[in-house]
Image: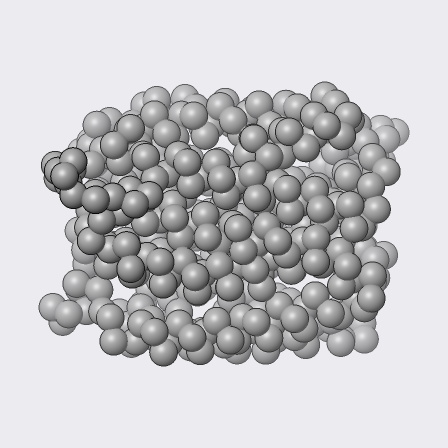
Amino acid sequence: MARSGTDTALLFSTRAIRLFAYGSLSVILALYLEELGFDGHTIGLLLTATLAGDACLSLLLSTRADRFGRRRTLVIGAVLMSLAGATFAVTRQTVFLVLAAIVGVISPTGNEIGPFLAVEQAALTQLVPDRRRTATFAWYSLAGSLASALGALVGGLTARGLQNHGFSPLVSYRALFSGYALAGAVLLVCFLALSREVEVVPPPVPLTTARRLGLHRSTGTVARLSGLFALDAFAGGLIIQSFVAYWFHLRFGVHEGVLGGIFFGANLLAGASALLAARLAARIGLVNTMVFTHLPSNILLCLVPVMPTLGLAVALLLLRYSLSQMDVPTRQSYTMAVVDPDERSAASGVTMAARTVGAAISPALSGLLITTSLALPFLVSGGLKIVYDLLLFRAFRGRRPPEEERA
């Protein structure tokens, strides 16, 4: 039991370290690419390549993690993250940047990327009882949101501070990529310290049982969830954090320090809402919580670009963040609950890959939409997310996780 507690603490720590690094890059990634001479459309294409490469990498690693070894999979991800950060820090050659973005682990969204989340969720589900799963995921989500918020703040202030002391924007951005590479090295050490308790306990399904992408009994359920999550992620990919930062820069001329402060507050609100989501789910169920908190946040998203002033736009964005992430721990908990124990890494990996593929297509489209109208990415994103909410409720309102069935 003591070892389980240690492993849980390590997984919370790696989540925080990783999201801090992701948050620090999300504020400056698009600005860095602009500094290298890329236009808005090309930036969108490169971000799409980044997310597409991550989808393939995550699917390859996470669907094999329960058999190959969860710790080994996490170690590989940490190495790839460190190498990608180092590459972005030392070169401006487009071919190397594209290779690092596709093969490595670079987060343009400020949120999870790579195989980490899928494997960590499977391990946490194994380390805690069913009745504590959603609450554990809520705290886990909070740890990530707080770390991402702090990373965005520190990233923005660091870039601005270095520039105020005479360094060029390019040098200030590369300093943050060096820190990103260092975070990957720290993750490597933490993952090596995990015990065997994070590995699959039940014996694997016999080799005679057909597996597809590491799944067997739950293939149909995961396929339906993946399709819906891909739609949601495609919509969300139109307004990823890096692009929203770019939008504020274009629309109101906001500099890096202010952008860091905006997303610091936004991620704080998103993290705090995760705890409320766990309490709400205990009362009305996981699926209801996912849908009924997501719908109003998408209406707010559509209203952000029509605000006439920076203050009003930021206020609506913050209000939207206070609701939009309440479906995250509930969605993750639900996915882990409705599959078998030896399918958890694969189920999480497949649904995450679907989300990443959906999100990968969007930034390139955002680049085109934003050249037509600054409001279009927000309006299209919000509308598609509302469609996702309605389809999810229709498909899964009758499928309950074990703890709700027992209750």
Drawn side of residue 81 relative to residue 290, left or right: right
Drawn side of residue 353 relative to residue 394, left or right: right
Drawn side of residue 353 relative to residue 27, left or right: left
Q: Nearer the viewer, residue 366 or 332?
A: 366
Rendering coords of residue 278 (x, y %)? 33, 64
Rendering coords of residue 300 (x, y %)? 61, 75
Q: Nearer the viewer, residue 227 or 341?
A: 227
Corner quadrant of residue 228 = bottom left
Q: Residue at x 67, y 53 (%)?
A: 363
Rendering coords of residue 52 (x, y %)? 57, 44
Q: Residue at x 68, y 76 (%)?
A: 303
Drawn side of residue 364 relative to residue 61, left or right: right
- The answer to whether one can see residue 87 in this image is yes
**Quarter the N terminus occupies:** top left
Tell me, what colour scheme is on the image?
Answer: one colour
- The answer to whether one can see residue 119 in this image is no
Q: Residue at x 24, y 70 (%)?
A: 399
Q: How many labels sit on residues?
A: 0
Q: Residue 186, relative to residue 339: is it above or below?
A: above
**Quarter the C terminus occupies:** bottom left
Q: Residue at x 64, y 56 (%)?
A: 362
Q: Residue 196, relative to residue 265: is it above or below?
A: above
Q: Nearer the viewer, residue 248 or 149?
A: 248
Rendering coords of residue 180 (x, y %)? 60, 30
